[in-house]
Image: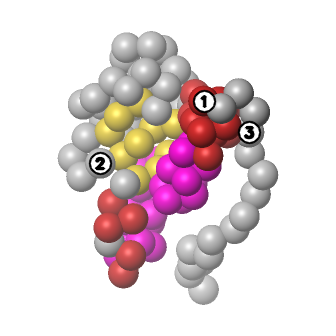
Amino acid sequence: MANSFIRVYQEHDLDNVKSRLLIAGDLAADCGSCRELGLDISDVQCKNCGTVYKYVTSRRIDSNQGERFKIVKRIKDKRPDLIFIDHSDYEKLMGQKKARDFFGD
Ligand SMILES: [Zn+2]
């Protein structure tokens, strides 16, 4: 029987995720560490900063909720080596972190 995608919650260090995150777009990908644009989803390493990716996410899953699992499957088929993280969770946590850093807490 084929496996299905089910969201699983795990603890990860946010700074570690940010520094090793590949952000997949429609056609190209960005580096979560240095924001380099125009990367390929198959890139193991950032051509600008040298980051070796461990995590992947996609902005598309936020705006295409019904397609969520298709998008995850397509990316996981290309990059089974990376841990797929939820983009809205990531953005929410980064926003909270920025606020904490700003207010010095
Ligand atoms: Zn980079």
Question: What amino acid is labelled 2 in the image?
Answer: Gly
Mark sitting earlier along the chain (2/3): 3
Q: Note whether 59 is above or below 2 in the view shown.
A: above
Residue 13, which numbered label? Answer: 3
Tell me residue 74's x, y (percent): 38, 61
- Distance from label 2 to label 3 (Cα)? 23 Å
Residue most extreme to the top: 49
The residue pinned by badge 2 equals: 25
**Quadrant position of the N terminus in the picture:** bottom right
The residue pinned by badge 1 equals: 102
Query: Closer to us: mark 1 or mark 3?
Result: 1
Would residue 85 be found to the left or right of residue 31 on screen? right
Q: Which residues are magenta?
A: 67-95
Q: Quadrant of residue 85?
A: bottom right
Cβ atoms under marks 2 and 3 closer than 8 Å:
no
**Does the numbered disc 3 mark a residue whose Cβ is under 8 Å from ligand 1?**
no
- Distance from label 1 to label 2 (Cα)? 29 Å
Question: What amino acid is labelled 1 in the image?
Answer: Phe
Please name the residue shown 32% across and 67% down the image. 63
- Distance from label 1 to label 3 (Cα)? 19 Å
* Crowd around label 3: few <14 · some 14–19 · many ≥20 (10 Å): few
Please name the residue shown 29% across and 48% down the image. 25
